[in-house]
Every structure is written in structure tokens, then in C-alpha cells.
Amino acid sequence: MGRAAGDLVLNRRRRNYDEEDVRIRPGRGSRPRTKVRPKHAGAVEGFVFGVDRGRYQVRVADGDGPVDVVAMSARELARKSVILGDRVGLVGDVSGRPGTLARIVKVGPRHGELRRTADDDDPTERVIVANVDQLVVVSALVDPPPSTGFIDRCIVAGFDADIDVLLCLTKADIGSAAIPEVESYYADLELNLVTCAPDRPLTALADTLRDKVSVFIGHSGVGKSTLVNRLVPGAGRSTGAVSAIGKGRHTSTSAVALALPGGGWIVDTPGVRSFGLAHVSPDSLLLAFGDLAQVATDCPRGCDHTGAGGDCALDTLRDVDGAPPQRLVSYRRLLQSLTG
């Protein structure tokens, strides 16, 4: 084919394009946005009782009884987190059938957020559970012996979160001799206190838990998971013995809420060796020691209550032998850990 003929064929294949022939694919994020979020007025209410790698176990009420639903956090929540104990709103498949997945679109107002940090100088606080009514501090009377320092820290965290505190003393069958000393040590705080033993009913403890969300916390090996298994048949929480050095082995590995047969929830937390209080202010700490706070009203303005200035009203407190009472020693030890 000659050159002239070839140019003729190319010209026939060409086409004149105009703006109607040009289509531009819209880029990412070019869709019109609106700040109006869906109302989800028909969202089903539920209680978050388990958290596992971005999936939430939620119990919802149903006409035929409670249904446990697996859900994920919806995009509408943005950065708002969902934690154990939250009251949430669900949409999607809430039948609870295997393989179904609902969406959490609402998180209700919270109260009683129990928090702790790994250490007193750790700025990162962790919310253990929300919407708590009661903090149950579990301590053995023997093997291992009571750690009043740890108990005090838990009490401070509970008081700071405006949560009722219950002191539960286990192994009363072999450690009953220590009960009067512990009762005396915490008498001024007017704490609720119950004792438990393997061969005795848990009637008193069960009565204080009914219709409440209660968090169990304590050192490993104090019998916390054993109590939970007795209170919630079939809970299957792992239990273990105390090591030769007097420290419990970690048994429960994750926090979970368990429904009580008579109504209410138990949140069983993993055994902890320390309870950091970096999130608690010195003023909140003093309020947790109500007996000392009343005396501190006579302190001069700006008193740091450490006793270093020599004019703290708390220094007037003395035992029979003239020594500062153990309550004051414990308070100042915690105060020092908070202020560095």
C-alpha cells in the first residue's frame, strides 16, 4: 500500500472528540460529605460482657430470654472506644446465630470507670471496665498473707471512681486469726467486709453482689477465680496454687463479665501484682482516707500533708506508744509514690 493510501486509512480511523466524550473518574474522597449521622432510633440495647481482638460479645434482651450477639464497632463511632461493661446500641443481625455479626452504633453514658496504670510513674492509664457499681477487693488471710498496701491502692482507685468498695477475705478456715487485725485496720473507712471459706456457703457475698456490676480484683493465688466458679456455676475460670516464694501464679488471663444466676454481673480480672495510681490526684487520695481527711481540715493552707514542713495537722495523730498510726503511714507512703 502506498503512502497516500495509508494516510487515507488513518484519517478514516480518527475521530474528532469534544468535552462530551471525556469522562473523568472521581477521585477518592470526592463524594459529598455530611455531618448528619444516622439516628439509629431502632438500635437494640445491649451490655458488653466480652472483648476479643476487635469483636465484642453483647447480651441483648429478647422476649424468649437473653441473646448473646457478636458485634463490631461501626464507623459512626469514629475514635470512641468500646470497653467491657459498656451499654451499647446495636443494628444489623442481632439474632445471635453462628456466623452473624452486628454493628455497635451507640455507646451510652458511662459511670464508675475503674482505671489503673502499670506503675505510679506511667502516664498511660487503662480503663479496666465501665459502669461499675462495686469493687470487690479479694485478699487471702494467709498463703499469701494480706497486703494492706495493695488493698489501700485498690480502695483509693475505687473511691476516686466513686465506686463502692467491698473487702472480701478468703481462706478464713485456716487464717481466721488474722481477721480481727484486718478489721481493725480498715474500721475507720467503714468498708463492707465479708469472709469466705471453702467449706462455708457464700450467702453473705452473694447478697452484696445481687443486681450489681461488681469487679473482682486481687493478687494471683488469693482464691479469686475459685470464688467466681462457686458463684457462677460453669464459669470455668482457671485456678492455681501459690508458688514457693509466696506470689501467686497468674491464672485468669483476660477480663470477662459473667452473669450471676440471681441477677447482676461479676467482672473477673486477671491477677495483678501492682496497681498503679498515676491517674489519681493527691487530693483524691486524701479523700479516700476519710478518717485522715477530717483531721487534715486543721492543716494550714498549702499543706502537702507529707509532714516535711512540721506543721501538718496529721502529725498530731499518735498511737498509744507515740508512733504515727499505720493508717497515716500507709497514706504517706502512697502520697510519696504519687508525688515522686
Image (cartoon, rainbow, N blue to C red):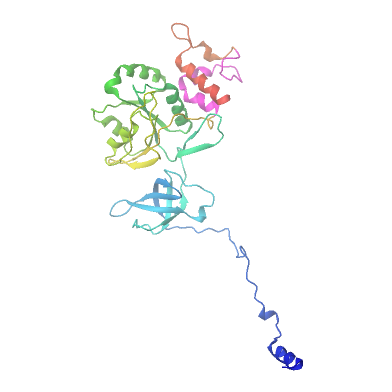
Indicate the quadrant containing the N terminus: top left, top right, bottom left or bottom right.
Answer: bottom right
| Lateral position of residue 114 relative to residue 34, left or right | left
Please tell me which residue is depicted at 39% across the width and 26% down the height of the picture: 247
Q: State which quadrant residue 42 falls in.
A: bottom left
Q: State which quadrant residue 13 falls in.
A: bottom right
Please tell me which residue is depicted at 42% across the width and 53% down the height of the picture: 71
- Tell which residue pokes out farthest to the front in this image: 1
Q: State which quadrant residue 15 falls in.
A: bottom right
- Work out whether 303 lies above or below 320: below
| Region of the chain picked out in magenta, as a range | 281-309
What percent of the width, then of the height, locates residue 100?
A: 38, 58
- Tell which residue pokes out farthest to the top in this image: 321
Please tell me which residue is depicted at 46% across the width and 13% down the height of the picture: 325
- Work out whether 109 lies above or below 22: above
**Residue 26 within the segment the image draws in magenta:** no
What percent of the width, then of the height, locates residue 102?
A: 41, 56
**Residue 292 within the segment the image draws in magenta:** yes
What percent of the width, then of the height, locates residue 27?
A: 63, 66
- Work out whether 108 lies above or below 291: below
- Work out whether 79 lies above or below 289: below
How many badges with numbers are in the image? Answer: 0
Indicate the quadrant containing the C terminus: top left, top right, bottom left or bottom right.
Answer: top right
- Tell which residue pokes out farthest to the right in this image: 4
